[in-house]
Image: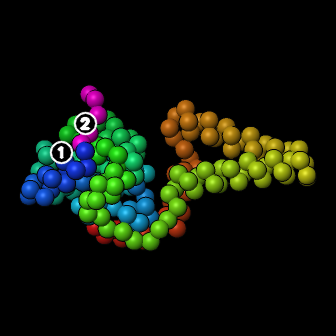
Amino acid sequence: MSLRTIHASKLHEMCSSGEHVDLIDVRTPAEFQELHATIARNQPLESLKPKEVIQQRNGSATKPLYVICRSGSRAEMACKIFVEHGFENIVSVEGGTLAWHAQGLPVNSGRKVIPVDRQMRIVAGSLVVLGAAAGYFYHPAFIGLAAFVGCGLVFAGVTNICPMLNMLSRMPWNQNGGQCST
C-alpha cells in the first residue's frame, strides 16, 4: 500500500465545507504549542498508540485520519505505524504545518521553541567538539566520546531510530505539562 497524501488547502476546504476532519499532529507538545493548524490535536509520535487513537476518534473510525507534522517526514512515519497496526485509511498532509501556515490557513501559535531535531544536532555537535577537545588537551581516551556520538548518528541515519532525539523530546522544556489545546 502506498502512502496517501493530501494538500493542506484541500484538507482545509473539506473542513470549511462542514465535512468532519480528524487531524492529529505528531510533533512534540512544545512544537505543537508553538504553531499548529487550528483543527489539529496533538498526539506525539514518540508516544503514538494507534489502537488508542482510533478508539478515541470523534466520529466514524472508517473515515480518514489525517496526520501532520512540521514538514511531512514524521507524519509519514506515523502513517506507516498506523498501517502496520491494520489501519489503512490514514492520510499524510503534504508539507506539514509549514505548508499549512505558508498557505495562510488558520493556525494557533504560542511560545517559540527550538525544534527537537535542531536540539539534537546542537547536542551531538557539542559532544563531538567536547570529546575532540578533551582528547587533544586532557587525555586521548576522550576521543571515544566523539566516536560514540558519531556511531549514534550513523545508527540513526541507517535505522531512522535516534535515541538522542527520543530522549530530548521527553525533556521538560519540550513538554507542555500534558495539556495541549487546539
Closer to the camera, 51 or 165? 165
Corner quadrant of residue 181:
bottom left
User: Is residue 174 highlighted in magenta?
Assistant: no
Q: Position of residue 65 (x, y in %)?
A: 22, 47
Q: Residues within 10 Å of mark 2 (few under 14, many from 20)?
A: some
Q: Position of residue 121 (x, y in %)?
A: 61, 50
Q: Nearer the viewer, mark 2 or mark 1?
A: 2
Q: Position of residue 52 (x, y in %)?
A: 27, 52
> Taking the image as drawn, is residue 174 in sight?
yes
Corner quadrant of residue 35:
bottom left
Point 55% across, 32% down: residue:
158
Closer to the camera, 170 or 100? 100
Dot 1 corresponds to which residue?
64
Location of residue 57 with respect to 153 vertically, above or below: below
Closer to the camera, 73 or 41? 73
Label number found at residue 4: 2
- CA gap, disc 2 to disc 1? 10 Å
Which image quarter is the N terminus in?
A: top left
**Left or right of residue 26: residue 105:** left
Q: Position of residue 123 (x, y in %)?
A: 65, 54
**Left or right of residue 38: residue 109:** right
Circle 1: element type:
loop
**Left or right of residue 127: residue 68:** left
Q: What range of the chain is rendered magenta?
A: 1-6
Pointer 2 with pointer 1, Cβ within 8 A: yes
**Kind of residue at disc 1:** Pro
Location of residue 59 with respect to 150 vertically, above or below: below
Location of residue 124 with respect to 114 vertically, above or below: above
Circle 2: element type:
strand
